[in-house]
Image: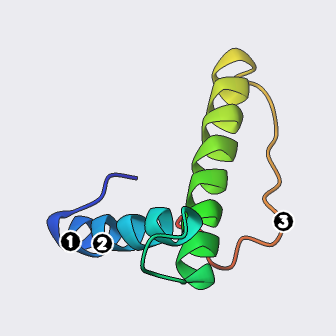
Amino acid sequence: MELNNESKTLFIPLYGKAMMSKNNLFINDPKAEEIIYMALRAKIIDEICNRYITQNPNTTVIHLGCGLDNC
């Protein structure tokens, strides 16, 4: 999934807040840290799954608990 311009304008400040919070710089925003963690975790899992599916084209994928995903 590519970020459109609107998404980028929201994601960039959120990432900045998360990094500042994580490094104890002026901001304490554990929710921003959590959101960034979840987004990065989802991206990594997507990459692993895509690589597996590419290497195993006849595989069957069952996506459980996908209510908030874009797939």
> Residue at 69% of width from left, 29% of height from top?
53
> Residue at 56% of width from left, 61% of height from top?
39
Q: Horizontal placement of 19 versus 13: left or right? A: right
Q: Horizontal placement of 30 versus 28: left or right? A: right
Nearer-the-camera pick, 57 or 26? 26
| Callouts 2 and 3 close, C-beta under 8 Å | no
Type of amino acid at the residue the image marks with label 2: Pro
Instruction: State the SS at label 2.
Output: helix
- Calculate the distance from the C-alpha at mark 3 to the C-alpha at mark 1: 30 Å
Q: Which residue is mark 1?
A: 9
Q: Which residue is mark 3?
A: 64
Nearer-the-camera pick, 46 or 30? 30
Indicate the colouring scheme.
rainbow
| Callouts 1 and 2 close, C-beta under 8 Å | yes
Nearer mark to the viewer, of 2 and 3: 2
Vertical relation: 1 (above or below) 54: below
**Residue 43 coordinates in the image, percent (x, y):** 57, 48
**Residue 55 coordinates in the image, percent (x, y):** 70, 16
* Among the 4 quarters of the image, the one containing residue 12: bottom left
